[in-house]
């Protein structure tokens, strides 16, 4: 089964590629890998939440935002090579804008990791970093990057 068919089976539609906020491109292929720029939880061009996780944004909401962000990252990959070219997900890097004392970054980034597992099965198992940060662009609670093998 192709990855696009798997997405359809799960009822998931890739969004359009989010427009860059500065001087960069959404994704770049180098050899057999595609690297995405950090993707925020945009839905139809709108950032769906702002604030820090553990204060204005609940960990549960942030986990859902990580899922939205990774879909945006997959859309960026799709725009460069096509989703069905993915061999495996190599690495996920998740940044979580964290309120003081919030240490649940791994659970938040699970929103991205779990979606990749649903879609790609064993090929979705990846290395990962989940990093708490003071601020993210335009007040986003979450930012996700992908490295995929094609």
Image (tube, rainbow, N blue to C red):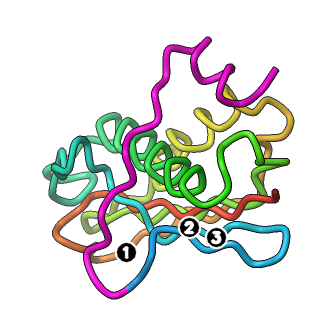
Q: Position of residue 133 (x, y in %)?
A: 37, 74
Q: Position of residue 72 (x, y in %)?
A: 43, 49
Cα distance in 3D space between marks 1 and 2: 19 Å
Q: Residue at x 54, y 64 (%)?
A: 145
Magenta stretch in the rendered image: 1-23
Instruction: Determine whether, in the image, residue 49 is placed left or right of residue 135.
Output: left
Q: Residue at x 46, y 68 (%)?
A: 26
Disc 1 is placed on an element classified as: strand
Other-residue count near label 2 (Cα within 10 Å), few / some / many at <14 / 14–19 / ≥20:
many
Other-residue count near label 3 (Cα within 10 Å), few / some / many at <14 / 14–19 / ≥20:
many
Disc 2 is placed on an element classified as: strand
Q: Check if residue 14 falls in the magenta segment.
A: yes
Task: Please report contact status of discs 3 and 2: CB closer than 8 Å, yes or no.
Answer: yes
- Check disc 1 and report the residue beneath it: 133
Task: Please report contact status of discs 1 and 2: CB closer than 8 Å, yes or no.
Answer: no
Quarter occupied by the C terminus: bottom right
The dot on residue 35 is 3
């Amino acid at each position: 089964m192709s990855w696009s068919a798997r997405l359809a089976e799960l009822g998931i539609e890739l969004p359009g590629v989010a427009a860059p906020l500065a001087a960069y491109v959404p994704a770049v292929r180098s050899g057999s890998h595609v690297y995405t720029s950090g993707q925020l939880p945009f839905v139809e061009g709108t950032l769906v939440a702002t604030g820090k996780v553990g204060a204005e944004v609940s960990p549960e909401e942030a986990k859902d935002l990580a899922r939205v962000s990774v879909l945006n990252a997959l859309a960026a990959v799709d725009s460069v090579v096509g989703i069905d070219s993915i061999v495996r997900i190599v690495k996920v890097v998740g940044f979580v804008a964290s309120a003081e004392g919030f240490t649940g970054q791994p659970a938040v980034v699970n929103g991205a990791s779990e979606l990749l597992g649903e879609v790609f099965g064993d090929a979705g198992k990846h290395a990962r970093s989940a990093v708490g940060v003071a601020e993210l662009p335009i007040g986003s609670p979450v930012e996700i990057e992908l490295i995929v093998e094609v």
